[in-house]
Image (tube, grey):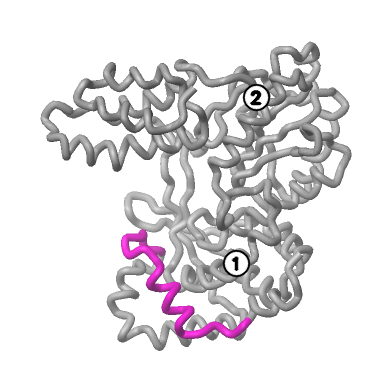
Amino acid sequence: MVQSDIADCLTHLVSDAEIRKAVFDGKASSSPGPDGYNFHFYKKCWHIIGPKVCKAVKSFFISGIMPTGIKATALALIPKTKHASSFNDFRPIALCNVIYKIISKIIANRLKLVMPHIVKDNQSGFIKSRISTDHIILAQEILSYAAKGKKSIFCAKFDIRKAFDTISREFILARLLQKGFHPLFISWIKSCIFDVKFSIVIKGSLEGYFSSLAGLRQGCPLIPYLFCIAMDAFSSILDDNLFVGAHFKDFRISHLLYADDLLVFGEASPRNCNNLLKIINIFTKASGLHINLDKSSLLLPKHLNIATDICRSLSLSYKESITYLGVPIFFRKLNISDISPLIDGIIGKLSGWNAKLLSFVGRLQYLKFTMLNSIAYWIRGATIPKAALNFSEEWHPNFYFLEICLLGKNCI
């Protein structure tokens, strides 16, 4: 819950300095909205348009009224795969007007200050001082400990279908009210997310406008925080009901969240699985978010003798590994075959050019800005097997210093 004094601070009058900061924190290279302008224009012309922009932004925070044209949004369809053929293969990215981004960014900057206090520790996405790789390490430790202790638990990864595009806006406002936010602050957010007109970008031009009844815009600064608050409702429902999570002595945990990436740990029994499905159905009816069972998966320990019953109860297919936040997790240690996605990804980056033509400095820069980030992410979230130290020579002998990077980290 938001304390009353903090809730009142969130509604303080917006200052010129706060507006200017929102403008100059914006990326100059951002794509323009329907009005054709981006942050670069506003920064360069701030000495001319600054006073009028401040007046317009303050007018919204005083009246709470936002003209429809300001929050009009262009939708750019970004393909998820190389050979996108259907609408489901595209990700709609919202291109908002800069004036709207300034307003939503001011609200978001105020909202993110209270996020660590109102969202449970299970959620790590978009929350200050919470790191996603910590959840990967925790998930792997839970599975490893359960395997060693012969614990009968399951690990289910649930995929939420079109999460940002289908969530109920009324549910978000109700959740904000439950959290104790000031009615004025909630009215600002309502003005931002309701009554939005969309236009599709086709070959660089806008084609018509249409409205929507649900969903949040991916590309709006405010949306990640609102979605985390909505998913926190699932955490509350799961912890307050009959579902039995994983427990080891005094340590108990039922799930991990990174935005819409949902990982659930629970006692492996048909009754417990049925309780989980009931909780998911309750959350679905309230929020409008639906689980995509075709993309969801289940992880079970080898010693479990009722694996078939668990799969049937959850209507999920059993898998030997689950990819969580880009890194595979198991009820065992990683081996060399498990890091094939990492190896294939780096080999893909090396293909298409001749590494022999690069100088040592060139190879070092390429490693630093492309491959090293991928390797560092895996090392931070998983323990790399020693056999992985040999794969740099298989790619190319001139990239042998990859081995030095791996030797500096903990390996099995």
Could you say whether the residue bearing mark 1 is in a helix, strand or loop? loop
Where residue 284 sits: x, y (%)? Answer: 75, 44
Residue 44 colored in magenta in the image: no
Where residue 361 sits: x, y (%)? Answer: 16, 39
Give the mark nearest the N terminus, 1 or 2. Answer: 1
> Count the marks: how many?
2
Q: Residues within 10 Å of mark 1 (few under 14, many from 20)?
A: few
Q: Which residues are magenta?
A: 12-33
- Residue beneath disc 1: 113
- Residue beneath disc 2: 144
Q: Amino acid at mark 2?
A: Ser
Q: Nearer the viewer, residue 96 or 24?
A: 24
Q: Residue at x 83, y 34 (%)?
A: 244
The answer to which image quadrant residue 217 occupies is bottom right
Q: Nearer the viewer, residue 211 or 177?
A: 177
Q: Amino acid at mark 1?
A: Leu
